[in-house]
Amino acid sequence: MTKKEDIVYAALELAAEYGLKAISMSQIAGKVGLTKSSLYSHFKSKEELINEMYSLLRNKARNSSDVPADYAMLFNGRGLEEILLICTSAYAGFLGDKDMMAFFKVLYAERSTSAAAAQIMLEETERMIGSVRNLFYALVVHGKMKKDNVDTAALGYAMAIHSLIDREMDRITAGEGKAIDAPDKMGIPEDICRYIKWFSEQMEVENE
C-alpha cells in the first residue's frame, strides 16, 4: 500500500467516526504519523484528499466486478432480465464493498451541508445514468430491448435502481435489513428483482 493510500484509509476511518467536516488535516496527519506539512506534500487540501478517496475506493470496488466488459459476451444467450440482473448485481456489489459503503455513509450524512459530499454523490449518480444509457443503446443494437425512448428509459431505470439501493442501504443501517447477499438472485434484494422483472417485461423485444 502506498503512503497516499495509507492517508486515504486513515482519513476514511476518522470520517466514519467523526464526519468529514469535523476532521482536520492535522488529525489525519497524526493518524498516519506525518507532520502536517508532510501531509500537504501529498494532498494540497482536504477536498483533494476526499476526491482521491472517492477515486481510489471506486476503482478498488469496480475492479472486483466480474461483469464481462464486452457487451457481446454479456448478451450472448441471455434475455433482458438476466442481463439487467447481472449488471445491477455488479453495481450493488460495488456499493456493498466494505470501504465504499463506509465512504458513502459519510457522504449521505453530509451531502445536505457539504458541497464536496454533494458533488461526489452527483457525480456517482451521473456516472450510473450514463452507464445505463450506454448499456441500453447496446441492448437495442443487439435486438434485446425495444428502441422507443431509450434515453428516458435509461434515466427512469437508473434512478429507480439508485433509489431502491438507497432504501436497502438505509434498512441495513437501521438494522432492519441484511447485507446484499441473496445467492438465488445474484445478491440482489427481492424488491429490486421484482422491479427488474417488471421493467424487462415492458421493454424486452418479443421473439416472433
Image (spheres, grey):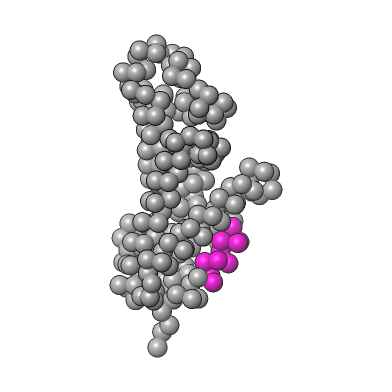
Q: Does residue 16 show up?
A: yes
Q: Main secondary structure of the magenta part?
A: helix
Q: Is 32 inside the magenta-drawn segment?
A: no
- Residue drawn at x 60%, y 51% is 168
159 with respect to 36 (left or right): right
Q: Residue at x 47, y 20 (%)?
A: 24
Classify the position of the C terminus by image quarter.
bottom left
Residue 75 coordinates in the image, percent (x, y): 37, 68
Q: Position of residue 107 (x, y in %)?
A: 50, 38
Q: Residue furthest right?
A: 176
- Determine which quarter of the picture holds residue 133: bottom left
Query: Where 57 falls versus 194 (above or below)?
Result: above
Magenta segment boundaries in residue numbering:
189-198
Does residue 1 show up?
no
Name the residue located 54 percent from the left edge and 29 percent from the top edge: 19
Taking the magenta stretch, the answer to whether it contains residue 193 is yes
